Image: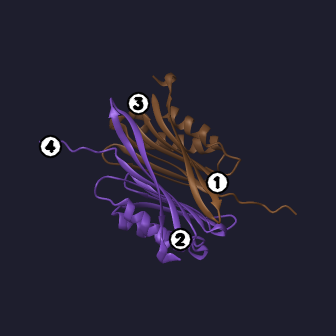
Chain colours: A purple, B brown
Amino acid sequence: MVKKVHSSIGHHYIVEASGCDPKVIGSVEKVQQILVKAAEIAGAQVWSVSIHKFPPKGVSGVIVISESHISTHTWPEYGYGALDIYTCGNRVDPEKAAFYAVEAFGASTSHITEITRGIEEGDRIYYHSLITWEEDFAGNK
Amino acid sequence: MVKKVHSSIGHHYIVEASGCDPKVIGSVEKVQQILVKAAEIAGAQVWSVSIHKFPPKGVSGVIVISESHISTHTWPEYGYGALDIYTCGNRVDPEKAAFYAVEAFGASTSHITEITRGIEEGDRIYYHSLITWEEDFAGNK
């Protein structure tokens, strides 16, 4: 009998998206559509959605997906959006979801750190590893 | 007249908490209490709370606070919890909140990366900086 392993490994994309379209990242409706679509693209099941407007112009949103979440906090006045996409398991594709969301925000460039979370170093002690890069979206500008 | 500046700077604590008490991190009620209390300790205003049980034993929770969020995803079967505390503005103290939550989880040790998000490098291009360390909680074990 094969024991089912519930892996603690997660992939968390931390993104600073610059040059975003203020009309997109300032709209609760558009941000919600983009995050829900990103969850679909990641192959994740949506459990709850919570999107709010925050002063003066920003949008703050979190979607809880199975074992993990997608979130954004935006500053349309700066064309800036902070985006997190955190997924667990092998059936999901967080990178595809992150790139979709950043392009949908209309970003011209982004600074990304991918964190691999929940790595066991032995004896049930867990850590994460990091890799950082820049990504340009020439098609958007 | 002084123009009010809405800073994009945020402080995001990414925590892998090990040696946690399964009875605490496996309980939706306890995890909710801890995250809400962490938000209070941070000095953040709670906008929404979404906490779920996920198979086989874990708890997945996100609290949206003003401009940012607190989240956790736990694996009681491994004594492991992944915790995020992301706050914006100068009136909040995310480190205090992170340490409170990790101790309340009963963790013996944690691997932490603090990410300073939304730093402008000029010309409305934003990036983040990182610092990683280990923190032991001798009182918990």
Q: Nearer the viewer, residue A123 or B44?
A: A123
- Above or below for A18 versus B92: below
Please say whether residue B107 is visible from this viewpoint: no
Q: Quadrant of the N terminus of chain B?
A: bottom right
Could you tell me the amino acid type at mark 3? Gly
Say whether disc 4 or disc 2 marks the residue closer to the N-terminus.
4
The residue at 57%/56% (across/down) is B127
Residue B135: horizontal and vertical position, in percent?
A: 51, 31
* Residue beneath disc 1: B9
Q: Position of residue A29 (x, y in %)?
A: 54, 73
Quote the CA–CA distance across marks 4 and 1: 48 Å
Instruction: Check disc 4 and report its element: helix, strand or loop.
Output: loop
Q: Are marks 4 and 3 in contact (CB under 8 Å)?
A: no
Residue identifier under label 4: A2
Q: Which residue is mark 2?
A: A108
**Mark 2 → mark 1, Cα distance in angstroms:** 20 Å
Q: Position of residue A101 (x, y in %)?
A: 46, 68
Q: Which amino acid type is marked by label 2? A: Ser
| Badge 2 and badge 3 in a common chain | no
User: Which mark is in front, 2 or 3?
Assistant: 2
Q: Which residue is mark 3?
A: B19
Distance from disc 2 to disc 3, alpha carbons, whole Å, reads 42 Å
Q: Are marks 1 and 3 in contact (CB under 8 Å)?
A: no
Pinpoint the chain carrying mark 3: B
Considering depth in this image, is A52 or B29 the residue closer to the camera?
A: A52
For badge 1, the amino acid type reads: Ile
> Is the residue marked by circle 3 packed among few (<14), some (14-19), or many (20+) residues within 10 Å?
many
Subunit ID for the residue under disc 2:
A
Q: CA distance from mark 4 to mark 3?
A: 26 Å
The residue located at (64%, 54%) in the rendering is B9
